[in-house]
Amino acid sequence: MGTVTRLFVVDDVELDERRMQLLVREKGMRVAESIVSRAMEEIATRLTHLETLFAAGDFGEVEKAARALAAIAAETGLVSVSRSAYDLAGLVRAYDSAATAAVLSRLIRVGEMSLVMAWDTHDAQI
């Protein structure tokens, strides 16, 4: 019988705090706060929706949803989320189901960690 190796996944999360600060300078604190709040809610919703689409095998919609998520994440400074979402969209087109599943899992992990960090960063700036 073989040896079982337990793997621990560690993902780095990258936030562009300057993007959030720029929103505050351009829009004012109240509007920027509203934009970031709505974006965080939208990102959380879209992460769940991506899981559902993938489980249903609707890969065309996975690609579209991943690209939309990537754009929202880039706009709010969630660099790791944006990068992972673009990676996911590219893998769907490559028809690599194992890699697509792995990147979707990474996107979910990075997304959850990024949302927590973004809220912490956002709260610290207020």
Image (cartoon, rainbow, N blue to C red):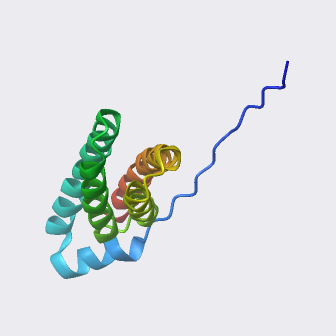
Give the image location of residue 18, x and y in percent: 39, 77
**In the depicted view, which residue is nearer to us: 76 or 124?**
76
Indicate the quadrant containing the N terminus: top left, top right, bottom left or bottom right: top right
Identify the residue shown where x is 25% and y is 61%: 68
**In the depicted view, which residue is nearer to us: 98 or 6?**
98
**Dividing the picture into quarters, in which one does residue 44 lie?**
top left
Identify the residue shown where x is 50% and y is 48%: 106
Give the image location of residue 54, x and y in percent: 34, 40
Give the image location of residue 52, x and y in percent: 29, 35
**Dividing the picture into quarters, in which one does residue 73 lie?**
bottom left
Identify the residue shown where x is 44% and y is 65%: 83
Residue 32 relative to residue 4: left or right = left
The answer to whether 52 is drawn above or below residue 71 in the figure is: above
Q: How many badges with numbers are in the image?
A: 0
Residue at the outermost front position = 95
Indicate the quadrant containing the C terminus: top left, top right, bottom left or bottom right: bottom left
Give the image location of residue 103, x and y in percent: 49, 50
The answer to whether 42 is drawn above or below residue 75 in the figure is: above
**In the depicted view, which residue is nearer to us: 95 or 126?**
95
Identify the residue shown where x is 22% and y is 55%: 37
Residue 90 relative to residue 57: left or right = right
**Dividing the picture into quarters, in which one does residue 23 lie?**
bottom left
The answer to whether 30 is drawn above or below residue 117 in the figure is: below
